[in-house]
Amino acid sequence: MRVLLTGGSGFIGSHIALLLLERGFDVLILDSYVNSSSNVINRIKAYLDKKDLNYKLKSINGDIRDKKLLDNIFIDSIKEKKPIDTVIHLAGLKSVSESFSNPLHYWDVNVIGTLNLLLTMKEYKCYSLVFSSSATIYGLSNSVPMAEDHKISPINPYGKTKVAIENMIYDLYNSNINVWKICSLRYFNPVGAHPSGLIGEDPIGIPNNLFPYLTQVAIGRQKSLNIYGNDWDTDDGSGIRDYIHIIDLAEGHLASIDYLNSKESCLEFVNLGSGKGYSVFQIIRQFELSTGCKIPFSIESRRDGDVAKSYADISKAKKLLAWTPKRSLEQICLDGWNWQLKNPYGFQ
Ligand SMILES: NC(=O)c1ccc[n+]([C@@H]2O[C@H](COP(=O)([O-])OP(=O)(O)OC[C@H]3O[C@@H](n4cnc5c(N)ncnc54)[C@H](O)[C@@H]3O)[C@@H](O)[C@H]2O)c1
């Protein structure tokens, strides 16, 4: 089976690529490298070579907004008699703060880019799609765990682009319910790294998210960890979030492909998280315990748009996709630290 993986050299995409290739899929990665390094592809190849695996991987440097390029990718695949069976669509921009300062760019890349992709899929009769949506679409709420029927009310432009894409997908599916097979996966907080330490999260600039910040403090790239509020309505006063090991999340995509392959047509919106909530202080404690590193931190004021608690109800994913997250918080800390130790400056 040939899979087109957009954004395949990014944090999440690289882990999905590796798992797909290990399972024998023929993988085409399309990425513009605006937020990733082409070294990722070499790392993936090095890992598979070391395992002596025969694999089919092609990487294309390009933009999902380039319709001609998308046409050529689909046409070439048909000519090679290996048409694209499924698209896993991750390419996009994901910084909440940047989406406030440059919203039109977010609408352009995320929404127009996806529109282009869906138009091309329809044209070349590729009807199977896994899309990376986000828990950000649930907006402000302390009602946990959050199931898929939780109120959709994004509070930032980034989240709004994800909702727009989910709406687009919904309309597309309903225009021809006999052919489209779509899973929109709403990720919570993917963290950790591949246990080999060859691929992992490599944010450009100062990390926005807790885990890469934490590992960069541990390695000495950042001075101390900022904790935004210690007066939340939680047991220890720090915010509670759902952290899912990146390999568990990647496995959710393979389970989604299996699910899509078992159906004539379908449209499903599915949470992918660990189903557990951990506070910032719990994360620091576990990280220190697992790695022996000391994490200096300072308490800052709350950020606009944060909530006390957010974690997923993952019963739908478990039932529908026959998938369950297997990796512990300790594993997350160990794998994330292993990646940071082996690559203090990421892929550079
Ligand atoms: N990481 C998270 O916490 C998280 C949570 C929820 C949803 N998501 C979504 O998952 C997807 C992947 O996230 P990630 O964490 O791997 O981010 P990432 O930035 O590491 O990966 C995205 C990839 O898309 C590429 N890209 C961006 N614009 C492109 C374009 N116009 N054409 C082609 N490639 C382009 C980037 O170069 C990058 O390699 C994104 O759509 C993101 O919104 C991520």
Image: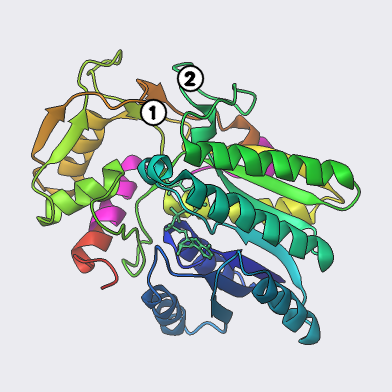
Residue wearing tag 1: 277
Residue at the far top in the pictured view: 233
- The span shown in magenta is 319-337
Tags 2 and 1 touching, CB below 8 Å = yes
Circle 1: element type = loop
Relative horizontal placement of residue 4, taking residue 198 as reference (left or right):
right
Q: Determine whether the beta carbon of the residue marked 2 sits less than 8 angstroms from the nearest atom of ligand 1.
A: no
The quadrant of the picture occupied by the C terminus is: bottom left
The quadrant of the picture occupied by the N terminus is: bottom right
Q: Which residue is found at the position 80% from the left and 46% from the top?
A: 172
Q: Which residue is found at the position 31% from the left and 66% from the top?
A: 197
Does the magenta stretch mainly form a helix, a strand or a loop?
helix
Q: Which residue is found at the position 43% from the left and 69% from the top?
A: 33
Residue 46 showing in the rendered view: yes
Q: Determine whether the beta carbon of the residue marked 1 sits less than 8 angstroms from the nearest atom of ligand 1.
A: no
Residue 65 among those drawn in magenta? no
Residue wearing tag 2: 144
**Disc 1 marks which amino acid?**
Gly
Residue 125 showing in the rendered view: no
Residue placed most toward the observer, 310 or 23: 310
Q: Position of residue 202 (x, y in %)?
A: 31, 60
Distance CA(mark 2)–CA(mark 1): 9 Å
